[in-house]
Image (cartoon, rainbow, N blue to C red):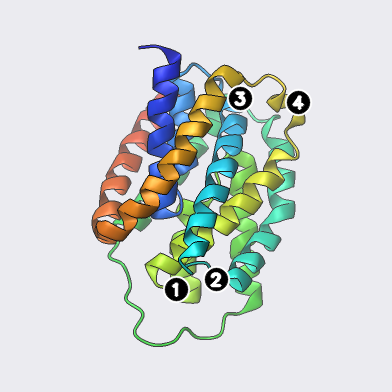
Amino acid sequence: MSALILALAAGAVVGLALGALGGGGSVLAVPALVYLLGFTTAAATTAALIIVAATSLTALYAHARSGDVRWKAGALFAAAGLLPAAAAGAASSRLPQPLLTAAFAAVAALAALKMLRPGRTVAAPPAPVRPATAAGTGAGLGALTGLLGVGGGFLAVPALVTVLAFEMRAAVGTSLLVISANSLSALATRGATAAGIDWSVVAPFTGAAVLGAWDGKRLAAKVSGTLLRRAFAIALLAVAAFMLADALV
Protein backbone atom coordinates (compact mmCIF):
# COMPACT_ATOMS: atom_id res chain seq x y z
CA MET A 1 0.00 0.00 0.00
CA SER A 2 1.42 3.39 -0.99
CA ALA A 3 2.46 6.01 1.55
CA LEU A 4 -0.17 8.41 0.18
CA ILE A 5 -3.05 6.01 0.79
CA LEU A 6 -1.75 5.18 4.27
CA ALA A 7 -1.41 8.89 5.08
CA LEU A 8 -4.94 9.63 3.90
CA ALA A 9 -6.44 6.72 5.85
CA ALA A 10 -4.53 7.52 9.05
CA GLY A 11 -5.38 11.21 8.73
CA ALA A 12 -9.08 10.45 8.46
CA VAL A 13 -8.96 8.40 11.68
CA VAL A 14 -7.03 11.13 13.51
CA GLY A 15 -9.53 13.76 12.38
CA LEU A 16 -12.49 11.63 13.46
CA ALA A 17 -10.97 11.21 16.92
CA LEU A 18 -10.33 14.92 17.39
CA GLY A 19 -13.68 15.99 16.02
CA ALA A 20 -15.71 13.47 18.00
CA LEU A 21 -13.75 13.20 21.25
CA GLY A 22 -11.82 16.46 21.51
CA GLY A 23 -8.54 14.60 21.84
CA GLY A 24 -6.59 11.49 21.01
CA GLY A 25 -5.50 12.61 17.57
CA SER A 26 -1.79 12.72 18.29
CA VAL A 27 -1.88 9.47 20.27
CA LEU A 28 -2.93 7.87 17.00
CA ALA A 29 -0.90 10.11 14.69
CA VAL A 30 2.51 9.36 16.21
CA PRO A 31 2.23 5.54 15.97
CA ALA A 32 0.82 5.85 12.45
CA LEU A 33 3.72 8.05 11.36
CA VAL A 34 6.32 5.77 12.98
CA TYR A 35 5.01 2.30 12.18
CA LEU A 36 3.08 2.86 8.96
CA LEU A 37 5.03 5.68 7.32
CA GLY A 38 8.58 5.14 8.58
CA PHE A 39 9.16 8.37 10.53
CA THR A 40 11.57 8.47 13.46
CA THR A 41 9.95 9.18 16.83
CA ALA A 42 11.42 12.70 16.91
CA ALA A 43 10.17 13.51 13.40
CA ALA A 44 6.81 11.88 14.10
CA THR A 45 6.17 13.95 17.24
CA THR A 46 6.94 17.15 15.33
CA ALA A 47 4.78 16.13 12.38
CA ALA A 48 2.00 15.15 14.78
CA LEU A 49 2.05 18.65 16.28
CA ILE A 50 1.61 20.15 12.81
CA ILE A 51 -1.24 17.79 11.99
CA VAL A 52 -2.97 18.19 15.35
CA ALA A 53 -2.65 21.98 15.39
CA ALA A 54 -4.31 22.34 11.97
CA THR A 55 -6.99 19.76 12.71
CA SER A 56 -7.77 21.09 16.20
CA LEU A 57 -8.26 24.62 14.92
CA THR A 58 -10.73 23.27 12.37
CA ALA A 59 -12.59 21.20 14.96
CA LEU A 60 -12.55 24.15 17.40
CA TYR A 61 -14.34 26.28 14.84
CA ALA A 62 -16.98 23.58 14.33
CA HIS A 63 -17.61 23.18 18.07
CA ALA A 64 -17.61 26.94 18.68
CA ARG A 65 -20.40 27.32 16.13
CA SER A 66 -22.47 24.96 18.30
CA GLY A 67 -21.69 26.92 21.48
CA ASP A 68 -19.73 24.05 23.03
CA VAL A 69 -16.55 25.98 23.92
CA ARG A 70 -16.01 27.54 27.38
CA TRP A 71 -13.57 30.24 26.35
CA LYS A 72 -12.53 31.58 29.78
CA ALA A 73 -11.74 28.19 31.32
CA GLY A 74 -10.05 27.00 28.14
CA ALA A 75 -7.92 30.13 27.99
CA LEU A 76 -6.73 29.58 31.58
CA PHE A 77 -5.75 25.98 30.88
CA ALA A 78 -4.06 26.95 27.63
CA ALA A 79 -2.16 29.95 29.01
CA ALA A 80 -0.77 27.90 31.90
CA GLY A 81 0.55 25.29 29.46
CA LEU A 82 2.32 27.54 26.98
CA LEU A 83 5.70 27.89 28.72
CA PRO A 84 5.89 24.24 29.86
CA ALA A 85 5.04 23.13 26.32
CA ALA A 86 7.82 25.26 24.87
CA ALA A 87 10.40 24.14 27.45
CA ALA A 88 9.54 20.46 27.13
CA GLY A 89 9.59 20.71 23.34
CA ALA A 90 13.14 22.05 23.45
CA ALA A 91 14.22 19.26 25.82
CA SER A 92 12.63 16.41 23.88
CA SER A 93 15.34 16.37 21.20
CA ARG A 94 17.94 15.50 23.85
CA LEU A 95 16.12 12.40 25.14
CA PRO A 96 16.72 8.86 23.80
CA GLN A 97 14.11 7.53 21.39
CA PRO A 98 13.23 4.36 23.41
CA LEU A 99 12.49 6.54 26.44
CA LEU A 100 10.15 8.76 24.43
CA THR A 101 8.40 5.70 22.99
CA ALA A 102 7.93 4.13 26.43
CA ALA A 103 6.68 7.42 27.89
CA PHE A 104 4.24 7.81 25.02
CA ALA A 105 2.93 4.27 25.61
CA ALA A 106 2.45 4.97 29.32
CA VAL A 107 0.51 8.18 28.64
CA ALA A 108 -1.67 6.41 26.06
CA ALA A 109 -2.47 3.63 28.55
CA LEU A 110 -3.32 6.17 31.25
CA ALA A 111 -5.64 8.01 28.88
CA ALA A 112 -7.35 4.76 27.90
CA LEU A 113 -7.98 3.79 31.51
CA LYS A 114 -9.46 7.21 32.24
CA MET A 115 -11.74 6.97 29.23
CA LEU A 116 -12.98 3.51 30.27
CA ARG A 117 -14.24 4.85 33.57
CA PRO A 118 -17.96 5.64 33.65
CA GLY A 119 -18.74 9.26 32.80
CA ARG A 120 -19.83 11.54 35.59
CA THR A 121 -23.21 13.22 35.29
CA VAL A 122 -23.30 16.85 36.38
CA ALA A 123 -26.59 17.46 38.15
CA ALA A 124 -25.83 20.88 39.60
CA PRO A 125 -24.02 23.99 38.41
CA PRO A 126 -20.24 23.54 38.69
CA ALA A 127 -18.49 24.89 41.77
CA PRO A 128 -16.07 27.79 41.39
CA VAL A 129 -12.74 26.60 40.04
CA ARG A 130 -9.55 27.24 41.97
CA PRO A 131 -7.21 29.10 39.60
CA ALA A 132 -4.14 27.31 41.02
CA THR A 133 -5.67 23.89 40.36
CA ALA A 134 -6.73 24.80 36.85
CA ALA A 135 -3.36 26.39 36.09
CA GLY A 136 -1.45 23.39 37.47
CA THR A 137 -3.47 21.01 35.32
CA GLY A 138 -2.89 23.19 32.27
CA ALA A 139 0.85 23.34 32.95
CA GLY A 140 1.05 19.55 33.16
CA LEU A 141 -0.81 19.16 29.89
CA GLY A 142 1.48 21.69 28.25
CA ALA A 143 4.58 19.77 29.35
CA LEU A 144 3.20 16.55 27.90
CA THR A 145 2.45 18.33 24.65
CA GLY A 146 5.98 19.59 24.22
CA LEU A 147 7.73 16.42 25.35
CA LEU A 148 5.69 13.78 23.55
CA GLY A 149 4.21 15.69 20.63
CA VAL A 150 0.65 15.23 21.89
CA GLY A 151 -1.99 17.89 22.00
CA GLY A 152 -3.13 16.81 25.46
CA GLY A 153 -6.83 16.63 24.62
CA PHE A 154 -7.23 13.02 25.70
CA LEU A 155 -6.13 14.15 29.18
CA ALA A 156 -7.72 17.61 29.00
CA VAL A 157 -11.21 16.18 28.56
CA PRO A 158 -11.11 14.09 31.78
CA ALA A 159 -9.48 17.04 33.57
CA LEU A 160 -12.18 19.46 32.48
CA VAL A 161 -14.90 17.03 33.53
CA THR A 162 -13.24 16.36 36.91
CA VAL A 163 -11.87 19.80 37.80
CA LEU A 164 -14.51 22.04 36.29
CA ALA A 165 -17.48 19.62 36.32
CA PHE A 166 -18.11 20.19 32.60
CA GLU A 167 -20.59 18.06 30.72
CA MET A 168 -18.89 15.93 28.06
CA ARG A 169 -19.87 18.08 25.09
CA ALA A 170 -18.45 21.26 26.63
CA ALA A 171 -15.30 19.42 27.72
CA VAL A 172 -14.72 18.18 24.16
CA GLY A 173 -15.16 21.64 22.65
CA THR A 174 -13.03 23.41 25.25
CA SER A 175 -10.24 20.84 25.05
CA LEU A 176 -9.77 21.75 21.38
CA LEU A 177 -8.84 25.29 22.42
CA VAL A 178 -6.23 23.86 24.81
CA ILE A 179 -4.88 21.48 22.16
CA SER A 180 -4.54 24.23 19.57
CA ALA A 181 -2.64 26.56 21.89
CA ASN A 182 -0.35 23.83 23.28
CA SER A 183 0.45 22.41 19.85
CA LEU A 184 1.34 25.81 18.38
CA SER A 185 3.51 26.64 21.41
CA ALA A 186 5.40 23.35 21.22
CA LEU A 187 5.90 23.75 17.47
CA ALA A 188 7.61 27.10 18.03
CA THR A 189 10.56 25.29 19.65
CA ARG A 190 10.96 22.63 16.97
CA GLY A 191 12.23 24.59 13.99
CA ALA A 192 15.24 22.34 13.39
CA THR A 193 13.18 19.15 13.52
CA ALA A 194 10.45 20.59 11.30
CA ALA A 195 13.00 21.31 8.57
CA GLY A 196 13.31 17.58 7.85
CA ILE A 197 9.59 16.83 7.66
CA ASP A 198 8.43 14.88 4.59
CA TRP A 199 5.64 17.19 3.40
CA SER A 200 4.59 14.74 0.67
CA VAL A 201 3.27 12.60 3.54
CA VAL A 202 2.37 15.21 6.15
CA ALA A 203 0.33 17.43 3.80
CA PRO A 204 -2.17 14.75 2.68
CA PHE A 205 -2.25 13.36 6.23
CA THR A 206 -3.21 16.82 7.51
CA GLY A 207 -5.77 17.41 4.78
CA ALA A 208 -7.53 14.11 5.50
CA ALA A 209 -7.47 14.87 9.23
CA VAL A 210 -9.06 18.29 8.72
CA LEU A 211 -11.88 16.76 6.67
CA GLY A 212 -12.24 13.94 9.20
CA ALA A 213 -12.67 16.47 12.02
CA TRP A 214 -15.89 17.75 10.44
CA ASP A 215 -17.18 14.17 10.14
CA GLY A 216 -16.18 13.53 13.75
CA LYS A 217 -18.21 16.51 14.92
CA ARG A 218 -21.28 15.16 13.08
CA LEU A 219 -20.64 11.64 14.39
CA ALA A 220 -20.49 12.88 17.99
CA ALA A 221 -23.99 14.31 17.62
CA LYS A 222 -25.41 10.96 16.46
CA VAL A 223 -23.52 8.29 18.44
CA SER A 224 -23.48 7.74 22.19
CA GLY A 225 -20.52 9.46 23.82
CA THR A 226 -20.03 6.42 26.07
CA LEU A 227 -19.75 4.11 23.07
CA LEU A 228 -17.24 6.42 21.37
CA ARG A 229 -15.09 6.67 24.49
CA ARG A 230 -15.01 2.93 25.05
CA ALA A 231 -14.14 2.07 21.47
CA PHE A 232 -11.38 4.64 21.40
CA ALA A 233 -10.03 3.53 24.80
CA ILE A 234 -9.68 -0.06 23.57
CA ALA A 235 -7.77 1.16 20.51
CA LEU A 236 -5.51 3.24 22.76
CA LEU A 237 -4.70 0.26 24.97
CA ALA A 238 -3.72 -1.77 21.91
CA VAL A 239 -1.47 1.05 20.66
CA ALA A 240 0.11 1.47 24.10
CA ALA A 241 0.87 -2.24 24.41
CA PHE A 242 2.43 -2.36 20.94
CA MET A 243 4.62 0.70 21.51
CA LEU A 244 5.76 -0.42 24.96
CA ALA A 245 6.78 -3.81 23.58
CA ASP A 246 8.68 -2.05 20.81
CA ALA A 247 10.50 0.20 23.30
CA LEU A 248 11.58 -2.72 25.48
CA VAL A 249 12.93 -4.87 22.63
Compared to residue 186, the image places residue 227 above or below, namely below
Residue with the mark numbered 2: 70
* Residue at image location 31% in from the left, 48% down from the top: 233
Which disc number belongs to residue 35? none
Image-based side of 122 in relation to 45, left or right:
left
Tell which circle, 1 or 2, labels the residue nearer the N-terminal end.
Answer: 2
Is residue 105 something that shows in the picture?
no
Compute the Cα span from label 1 to label 3. Answer: 35 Å
Residue with the mark numbered 3: 43
Compute the Cα span from label 4 to label 2. Answer: 35 Å
Badge 4: residue crowd in 10 Å (few <14, some 14–19, many ≥20):
few
Under circle 4, the secondary element is: helix
* Residue at image location 31% in from the left, 36% down from the top: 238
Under circle 2, the secondary element is: loop
Compared to residue 179, the image places residue 80 above or below, namely below
When asked about the image quadrant of residue 248, the answer is top left
Q: Are marks 1 and 2 in contact (CB under 8 Å)?
A: yes
Tell which circle, 4 or 2, labels the residue nearer the N-terminal end.
Answer: 2
Tell which circle, 2 or 3, labels the residue nearer the N-terminal end.
Answer: 3
Residue 48, horizontal then vertical, whole percent = 55, 34
Tell which circle, 1 or 4, labels the residue nearer the N-terminal end.
Answer: 1
